Structures are given as C-alpha cells and as structure tokens.
Image (spheres, helix red, strand yellow):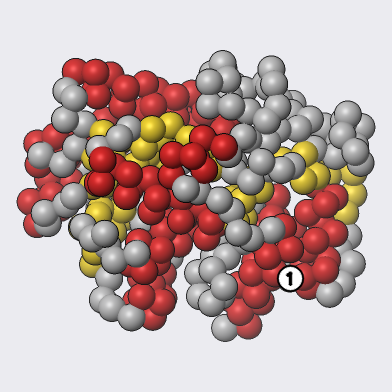
Amino acid sequence: MSGRVLLTGGAGYIGSHTCVELVEAGFEVVILDNFSNARRDVIDRLEVLTGAPVICHEADVLDRDALDRVFAAHDFDAVVHFAGKKAVGESVAQPLDYFHTNCTGFSNLLQAMDRAGVRRVVFSSTATVYGKPEVLPYPEDHPLRPESPYAANKLVCENLLRQVKAADDRWSYGILRYFNPAGAHPSALIGEDPNDIPNNLMPYIAKVATGELPCLRVFGDDYDTPDGTGVRDYIHVVDLARGHVQSLKLLIGQDQSHIVNLSTGQGFSVLDMLRAYERACGKELPYEVVGRRAGDLAAFWGDPSRARDLLGFETTRDLDDMCATSWAWVSRRKNS
C-alpha cells in the first residue's frame, strides 16, 4: 500500500519510529513539528534509517496559516497526529496550557484537513482515559473516567472525532489508546530523549544506568501486586509504531473507523522493569522506596484482542527487548 501521510509531531519519540515504519511499508511521509520536545538532528537520523530525504516543516498546530500552507504544498491521503503535550503531572499544574495545545491544536488540524479535503486521521490517544479499572485487562468499552487534564484532553479529542464523523460520514478515524511505550529502534539511532528529568519509568532508569541520576525512586511498595510495586503494561515503541501503520492501512483501504488498545496484554512491575534493565546494562542499579504518589493506580494493563482482530496487530518484542534497545540507544547517545 502507498500514500502520502502527514505526521504531526513526527520528530518526537513515537512519531520518529512511526516515520521509519511507514516508509518501510511504502508510504511517503511529511513531518510537521515545532521541535519543542524533539531535537532537529532527528531528521538527519531518519534520513539515514530510511535511506531517503525526509521532508519536514517546522511549524505548530496552533498556527492555522502554517497548517494551511503545509496542506497546500502536499496532496495528503491521511494524517497521523502525535503533536501535543503529554506529562500528566505538568498537566495538573498547567491545565489551560494543556487544553490550548492539545485540544485547540487538534481542532485547528481537523479544520485544516477539512479545508484541504483530507478526512482520514489516526489519533494518538492514551489508556489514561479509562481511569480507575473496574475490570482488568481494560477493554475498549470500559467506562471512560479520565483523572488528569492530560487524559481529559485526549477524551475531548476522541469525542470531537466522533462528532465530526457523525456530522460528515466522509471522515474516518483510528483512535489508538496507548499503554506505556518503551525501548528504542534496534539501530540505536532514535529513541526516547527527554529534555529534563523523565516522567516515564524506563527513561528514568536509563538515566540512573548512565549515572545522570543517582537512583530510582520507587513510589510505594505496598500495593496489592506480586512485589508490592505498581504494575503497568509496557509496549515496545517499534511495535507501537507498527500499530499506526496497520491502523492507517485500514483507513486508506476500507475507510473503517476504529478505537483500539495498543498493548501487550501483560503487566510488569516497577521492580520487574528495574531487574530487566540491570540485565541489559550488566550492573545493579540503586533504588529507594518512597511514599506513594497521589493518584497512582496499583495496576493496569490492556486487552489487545480488538486490535489483533481488526488490524492484525500483535506485539513481537518483550521487556528484555525494550530494555536492551533502550540501553543501546542511551549508551550511543552518551558516548557520541
């Protein structure tokens, strides 16, 4: 299958990996990114990985005129939307900023698409829209009770897509509810590269492994889980990127809208992750147990069966793969 695809936020962690998978699947890719949370040399590394020039527009989804210029310059078949803010804690402190970037930005994008006659979109959502689990694993029809401004933003955007589709049946969408992306490309040329102290577990452990942070802080070891620490569903970023390709193929091939979890269907604890990273880097890593964080759940993981049935989506990489590729990436970055 072929087609030209716009990736908003395509220079970021998940966007860059998806760019590689799309090119390998035969798609032409154009990136739009404001580089607020991505490095410009990612584009050079993507050109090495894809073996071809990468078209990139430095622009913001909040800039309506810039969006119109990008759509006028290219004949797109679909859009994959990653651009946005994503730190749960920061969203609590900055709810207005998060709503403006994530919700107004997405509305701007959909309006620009509509003006250009491009009405297929894959939307990067999150499992945090589910809130506290009533059942595990989370199915897609689980009640939606977001507990942070970030999660609420994602649900606003999901609902907007449903409303746009209800008003104009020419639209089709794929809503992909992520669990916890981890790992890096096996080439070690691209990976997660947060600008400051990481919000996610694996990049935090990675910084402990490289000596950039003194130790891992484990928030609570008295949960009702096998080892007392929080359990989460981690998915390798390359598997996650492949899920976007499969979603896009369903939209372009059949215009079939869908909402699916992208997950492994298996939970791992904080200490599981720490031990796996120790195996990857070949040394023990220091940690200390501190008090629970307000709002943290004991455990959650997703049911991936709908994604398997609709998209043919299955994960192929395990926790050791996630840690090994992350360690290769951070080691290369630190020594370069």
Q: Position of residue 74 (x, y in %)?
A: 12, 56
Would you identify the image quadrant in which residue 286 lies? bottom right
Give the side of residue 141 with respect to residue 202, left or right. left
- Residue 183 drawn above or below residue 235: below
Q: Residues within 10 Å of mark 1 (few under 14, many from 20)?
A: some
Q: What secondary structure is found at the residue carrying circle 1?
A: loop
Q: Position of residue 290 (x, y in %)?
A: 87, 39
Give the side of residue 290 with respect to residue 10, left or right. right
Image quadrant where one finds the N terminus: bottom left
Would you identify the image quadrant in which residue 191 lies? bottom right
Given residues 310 and 175, the one toward you in this image is 310
Given residues 73 and 166, the one toward you in this image is 166
Residue matched to label 1? 210
- Residue 186 drawn above or below residue 9: below
Q: Position of residue 282 (x, y in %)?
A: 84, 74
Give the side of residue 76 with respect to residue 251, left or right. left
